[in-house]
Image (cartoon, rainbow, N blue to C red):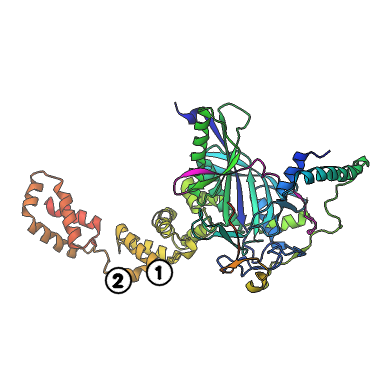
Amino acid sequence: MISIREVEHVALLARLSLSEKEKEIFAEQLSTILDYINKLNELDTDGVEPLYHILPIYNIFREDEVKTGTSREDILANAPQVEEGQYKVPKII
Amino acid sequence: MTLSGDYETVIGLEVHVELKTASKIFCSCSTSFGAEPNTQVCPICSGFPGMLPVLNHKVVDYAIKVGLALNCEIAEFCKFDRKNYFYPDLPKAFQISQYDLPICKNGYLDIDINGDKRRIRITRIHMEEDAGKLVHQGDITTTPFSLVDLNRSGVPLLEIVSEPDMRSGAEARAYMEKLRSILLFTGVSDCKMQEGSLRCDANVSVRPRGQRELGVKTEIKNMNSFRAVEKAIDYEAKRQMEALEYGEEIIQETRTWDEEKQVTRSMRSKEEAHDYRYFPEPDLPPLKITPEWIEEIQASLPEMPDQARGRLMEQYGLSEYDASIITQSPDYLAFFDECLRNYSNAKTVANWMMGELSRLLNQNNMEISECLVKPEDLIKLLGLIDNGTISGKMAKTVFEEMFAGGKKPELIIKEKGMEQISDEGTLKAVIEEVVANNQKVLQDYKNGKKKAFGFFVGQVMKATKGQADPSAVNKLLRERLDK
């Protein structure tokens, strides 16, 4: 069972603000999801190599070559606020 | 009673080094430093939705190279992970890094501390991407906004993590200096602390001497020079010892080094923030590193600082101290080696490099690669001292001029009329004049006031604007005064 405290912790990490009611709902829903996933633990995985990536491919590279990127105008086109060619954001210290 | 006698300081360092690749780690944008903000960016390094990273081959080559240079085991298999946190300089809200399977682990490097060799173990080295840069507008304490430049976002980094094996600020500094010289010799980074291509965070704790278990640590950031690393750590250790003496608890937190006030200040508490929820990066397939690949990199490793130091001591009889200064960077060593190709006195070259050359480089905040004095110029100057054209003292003046304008030593000496006067006839004439003008002092000298000799030397040097050959002056003056 996921506790309200755990929901609050995860919500804080995701920068979500939840009402008391929502916390209860999510505690219950998250618990149900985790219980479902926990079914996997019933499988015997002795001797099975851990899987780190879903595709059986390795060592996909590009060479170290510079290509012209996107123009500053284009890259900043969707920024909510721009100043001196930069994204303008609230100060975080 | 001193606190440092009762407590032991324990230090581990996390070093970030920017790799000198042409393009970024996961996209083809340029990594060059100092461009206009947001002019070396693309949808990948700006974290636009749906963009896919592709790994730069050279980053892996460089990581293996550094791992080998630092005596690490190279992983046969490794992968990337996402480190999740929110910060405006991190556009994807996660950093692609390596978590449980880093590319290198279990290495070490050796430092010399007051003649003692200490081995500092390296826990791991992993590859990751750098974040962007935040610029605060106006006064940082009052402005409500920051500006974000993503040129640095996606520049390849290696994070090199040491074991908590250091015991003082001086050891941490020695570790950083040694690490820098090894990295410079591998050629993977320019390691400029001022420009941020070499950065260091220190984990510092103290414990009562004899206690096994580690004390609560703090992490110190924003140390922008080797000196700052040493000072900040020593300050922080002392702060913690004093806190413990007063019965206060040390809080695990991040602290920043305030260069101006020379203190560490609390930045933020780490209790809640430390949950990065790492998980494997699904957009990058894992790496398999073959023994052949490792051998190929091994074969490309140049002479490392420790080897070079041994060579200088053996081949030229330099002291360990001199040899370690000369091997601080490959450019320094190349300068020395180049001088020695056409000049035989290694000790003299070392002295000039460690003395005048280093002094002027430091004074002007320059690298030896930017220096206008080339090896052939220095040995030319040394030759002019050796054959008596100028005195060692004058050579320093000439050297300063060479350093400032890149002029050849012979030209400077000629232009300034600095040739040393060693012609006996000329000097004798000067001496006669000086003696004639100072009959009283001569009398004093003859009456046993031997100190007066120095007076005459001074007068002769003055009359020749310092150009007289001192040994010739000494000899001729003695002959004249004692006759």
Q: Which image quadrant: the N terminus of chain B?
A: top left
Give percent across and percent down for residue B424.
20, 62
Residue A43: name its quadrant. Answer: top right
Q: From what the image shows, is residue B409 above or below residue A47?
A: below
The chain containing the residue under callout 2 comes to B
- Sooner in the amino-acid sequence: mark 2 or mark 1: 1
Residue B158 in percent (x, y) is at: 65, 54
Q: Secondary structure at mark 2?
A: helix
Query: Which residue corresponds to the image point at 48% horizontal and 60% vertical from the top-left?
Result: B367
Residue B69 included in the magenta stretch of the image: no
Name the disc covering residue B34, or none. none
- Residue B303 seen in the current view: no
The residue sitting at 67% across, 70% down in the picture is A75
Name which residue type carries label 1: Gly
Q: Of the residues shown, which amino acid type is indicated by label 2?
A: Lys
Position above or below: B108 against A70: above
Which contiguous range is marked in magenta? B259-286
Viewer-closest of B250 and B163: B250
Percent of width and height locating residue B378 = 41, 63
Quarter of the rendering containing residue B480: bottom left
Camera-nearest residue between B272 and B261: B272
Q: Mark 2 and mark 1: span between their CA atoms?
A: 15 Å
SS state under label 1: loop
> In the image, B247: left or right of A67?
left
Density class for disc 1 (Cα within 10 Å; few <14, some 14-19, many ≥20) is: some
Q: Is residue B283 visible?
A: yes
Q: Residues within 10 Å of mark 2 (few under 14, many from 20)?
A: few
Judge if badges 2 and 1 mark residues of a common chain: yes
Instruction: State whether the magenta stretch is mostly helix, strand or loop.
Output: loop
Residue indicated by mark 1: B406
Q: Pointer 2: what residue?
A: B414
